[in-house]
Structures are given as C-alpha cells and as structure tokens.
Image: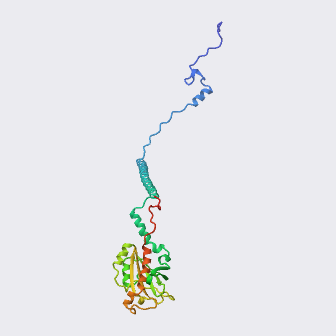
Amino acid sequence: MSMPGRSQEPRRRLKAPASGARGGWPPPGSRASGAARARRVPAPAVPRRVRPWPAASRDRAAAERAVRATLEQGVRFRAVFLLLAGVILVIAMTNVLVGAAGLVHESGSRRLTPAEQDRYVKDEIAGRWRTWPATLVFPTELQYVGLGGAQQYARRIGMAPEVPCRVGTDTPVGTTLAEQGCRTLLRATYADQTSTFVVTVGIAVLGDEERRMAATSRLAVDDRVGVRPVAFPGTASALFGAAQRQRNAWIGVGPYIVFFTAGYADGRTREAVAPEEILHSELWPVAQSVAGRIARALGDEPSAVPRCTQGNVC
C-alpha cells in the first residue's frame, strides 16, 4: 500500500563498494572491474639458491691471478723500457754536446805549439818521397864544382823503378835495412858534364828518423858495399856494374839514407884503378856533390811552417 508523499519505487539495498574500486567505482560485475582484476601483477618469484661448483671457483680464481700477474709483468717491463730509453737518451745527448763542443774548439783557429810545429816539419819531410814528383826527388841536372872551381852540371841519365831495400843493395846493407823496416828504395843514375864518371844514388826510406839512426849505427864501415848501380843501355852508364864501383858511401837525413856509388864510364873495375888515382881523381868529389844536393833537398825544413791550426791566422 502506498503512502501519500513518498515514491512508489521499491527501496534498493545499498551494498558496500568492492575493495578493488575506489569510491565504489566501477561497480562490481562490470567489465571494467574484470579488467582491473586481470591486470594484477603477480609477486616476483624468489630465485632458488644454487650452490657453486668448487672446481669452477678455483679455475676462475687462477685465471684472475694469471691476468693480474701478466699485467704486473707488463708494468714492470714498461718501467724498465722507459728507464733504458732515458739512459740511452741521456748518453746520446751527452755525446752530441761533447762532439759539438769539440767541433767548436777545433774549428776555431789557435796558435800551434812548438811541439806541433816540429811534428809538422817531420811529417812534411817524411812524406816527400811520395808527395814530390820524381823530377824533384831526382832533378834533371845538379850543379857541382869542377876542377879549378868551374861550375859544372851533372845530368840525370835515368831513374829505376822502386825496389825492396834488399834487392837494391848489397846483402849486408839490405839485411840491416830490412831489420829496421825499410819501406822502399829509389834509385837514379847521373853522369858528370864530361860523361867520364857515372854515379848511382839510392834513397832508402825508413819509417822515421829514429829508425834511420838505428839502421845507420849498424851499417858496416866498408866502402865496397852499398847501393847496387843501375845501368841504362845506350848511355854513358851502360858498362856501370857492381865490379865497376870504385867507392860507396851514404848520407843520413830525416827518415832517409841516401846511398851513392861512383865509377868510370869506360867500364874500369875497382881492381884496375890504383888507390892513389882515386884519391886525386875528380870522380869522388862529383859523386859527393850530386848525392849531397839530393840529400839536402830531402832534409831541408819547409820554407813556410804554419803558425796556427788554420794557416797563419789565429
């Protein structure tokens, strides 16, 4: 039965909203409510604890130790390499600086000491036998004083090739020269202005003045031995052989021993000439003059000795 002033709709019982919907929305049973239930994320599963295998752990630790040892060795090698490189660089720089300082010192001109000047003179004299032309060692003509003081000239007939000292001298002389390291023997033959006498001059080259003095101190005092004569066919010396030598002698100068021997152009032997004739003959003075001029030219000091390391400007 209806009551006046009230709605005739039946009363609806209000239910409490579901716990999953805020403010009672969406209502239970709706499709939105079902979707909400479908989107629920399940709780993460707890991983199961797996016990590690003991052998695998040992292998991994050994591998790590090997890698660490390799790295440490590389670091040590790098340090050693850097140290060696630094030492080499320092040594190289030191050498460069020392060389530069020496170059600057040597490139600057300075005055030669007396000992250096003396060494220059000795070296220049010792090298003349190979630096001078043959015509300067054995000039084409050599002046000498003849009978009555007349100026005359001996002319060079010919020059022989270089020979070992033993080959160009008599055995006693050659042995002594070889013992003192004789380098070579140079020879040439001259005739006086009248072509009556012939003279062979031989230059024995020693290493230095000391060796030359040692050799001359051992040479026998015997005018029958010395340099062997050199004859040139078709000239005044054609008959000049070992038997035709009248006398032998030598002159020492610097590192040289200048041997000389003389004879007659007509081929007379030593036995065929009386000793007194040799003493009064012009033969020996001519030979001494020719050999003496050659020796003096070889041993004379240079006309100009530099005062400084670079000429004469210090």
Which of the two residues, 24 or 115, is positioned nearer the viewer here? 115
Relative placement, left or right, of 54 versus 193 is left
Q: Is residue 191 above or below residue 26?
A: below
Q: Residue at x 60, y 26 (%)?
A: 33
Q: Position of residue 229 (x, y in %)?
A: 44, 85
**Colour pattern of the rendering:** rainbow
- In the image, residue 44 lies at what x, y percent? 50, 35
Q: Residue at image x 47%, y 74%?
A: 130
The residue positioned farthest toward the front in the image shown: 148
Q: How many marks?
A: 0
Residue 158 visible, this angle: no
Residue 312: where, in percent of width, then height?
A: 47, 61
Residue 208 falls in which quadrant of the image? Answer: bottom left
Residue 81, placed above or below residue 183: above
Can you say which quadrant of the picture contains the N terminus?
A: top right
Q: Is residue 221 left or right of residue 34?
A: left
Viewer-proximal residue among 308 and 175: 308
Q: Quadrant of the C terminus?
A: bottom left
> From this viewpoint, is residue 177 visible?
yes
Residue 50, percent from left and from top: 44, 42
Left/right placement of residue 225 relative to residue 139 reads left
Q: In terms of depth relative to the viewer, which is nearer, 124 or 72?
A: 124
In the rendered image of this protein, does residue 52 appear above or below residue 180? above
Q: Residue furthest top?
A: 4
Q: Eyeballing the image, is 136 above or below 266?
A: above
Res 202 → quadrant: bottom left
